Amino acid sequence: MQGAQTFGELLLRLRTKAGRTQEKQAEVINAVSGRDTMSRREISRYENNENIPTNHTVAHIAITFGLSPEQLQKHASAARAQRRNGGGGAGRAQGDVKRRVAAQLAVLAFAAPSSTAQVLEQSAAEALEFTRQAEATKLGSGTLDHLEVAVAGFNSAYCVRPPQAIFEAVLDYRRKIDVMLRAQHTHQQGRELYAFAGWLSELLAWLAHDLGDARTGLAFATDAFVHAQQAGHGQLCAWAMDAAASINLYEQRPAHARAAALKGLAEAPATHPLTVRLHAQVARASAADGDADGFSVAFNAAREAHSLLPPRSPSRFGVDVLPFADYALTSYPATSYIWLGQAGNARRHAERALTAYATAPAASRAPSREAIARIDLALAHAMLGAPDDAVSLGHHALDSTRVVGSVRNRAAGLTTYLARRYPRAANVEGLRERLATESTENAAALPAVPLEG
């Protein structure tokens, strides 16, 4: 950080180096602070030396650049002191600083050997202080190890425990990490904390979706993406956008879902199963928008990506993620063909999806996704003129150990279609009543879903 520059110039240089626009910098600061108060205009005022942020805001700005708050606050304090002392404005103050630095350099250049030695000795002491500051931290020695175990445990619990049972516990850990990010830590620790924060926010996005709160789900998906960017974790960025794509689809916003999936594809490793899944998300969004050609192009891209996967599949917190790609190539097309009105194709892919779920390793089983595949199969039967089979499959889906918001959403679509297509079928009303009862009981069990943290 050069002494000849103003505080505003320092902020501009840091932002330029990070490759952010003023709008993006304001967005990142708001994500760190947990408030929506920073704007592009305020960033411009800071960089043009029209205003100097408070130390509290400076701490948030420092975190966005991977610096400790103290590193940036001393520059802000110096700028305030210079402004209090007058000096004829920012331009004159900058000129004074430049002249002072030039004079100091000239003294060093022409100093006697003894004076140079003294300057170098002082510089050695400063270097030691720089090193001490870089290694300074208030995190306990086992904190990061504990967080890794906790995040892995929450991910393992996701598919086997009701969402309301773990949402608040995950949110509590997410808040703890937010406190740690505001405390003193090393740059490397900061990157790891950002990653843990992102993983927990990604999980909270899915949990909020399961609990039927799309707004909270999308907020946490965005938070996961921002923290993943700060951690330099492209794969986590992609996972966050996968969640955003699904949530937007269930909110009947296919254009937003497609945009999220494409944003994730820009970050996902080319030979990772997640790339297959994101292409399939684009296909599903196209189908939801009634775009059969767009669906075909994206689905072919998903199949091509699947053919390029390496022999050894990566894992996510110890769980093989290849089934996520396999499911996407079966269950997503089943849903898509339902939306495109192609019942025969929908039935074939739904049957394949159920086979894939049944043969998956226990750690990779997903009861809610299996229930949705069963509902897709039920809809295909209903479209093909077999309402009794459709009702039976609907009941089987509601027998799942994890009937979450997405399952109830699709089940409601099934009962609505059955009631319209087969208004005299008595067993359809029984399925509707069961779904209504379970939805009411679930709503009563939902925890409060706060947005802070």
Image (cartoon, helix red, strand yellow):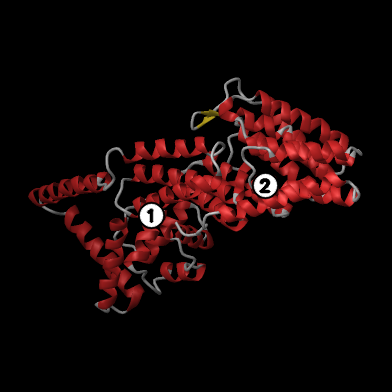
Crowding at mark 2 (Cα within 10 Å: few <14, some 14-19, many 20+): many
Residue at (53% x, 52% y) in the render: 220
Residue 167 is left or right of residue 147, and the answer is right
Who's the residue at 61% across and 28% down the image? 322
Report which residue position mark 1 lands on: 63
Could you tell which of marks 1 and 2 lies nearer the N-terminus? 1
Q: Please state which of residues 376 and 225 is positioned toward the viewer in this rendering.
A: 376
Q: Residue at x 47, y 49 (%)?
A: 227
Secondary structure under the numbered disc 2 in the rendered image: helix
Q: Residue tagged by mark 2?
A: 406
Q: Quadrant of residue 335?
A: top right
Circle 1: residue type:
Ile
The C terminus sits in image quarter? bottom left
**Real-space Cα distance between discs 1 and 2?**
36 Å
Q: x, y (%) of residue 178?
A: 39, 53
Q: Position of residue 270 (x, y in %)?
A: 61, 33
Regarding residue 369, the answer to whether it shows in the image is yes
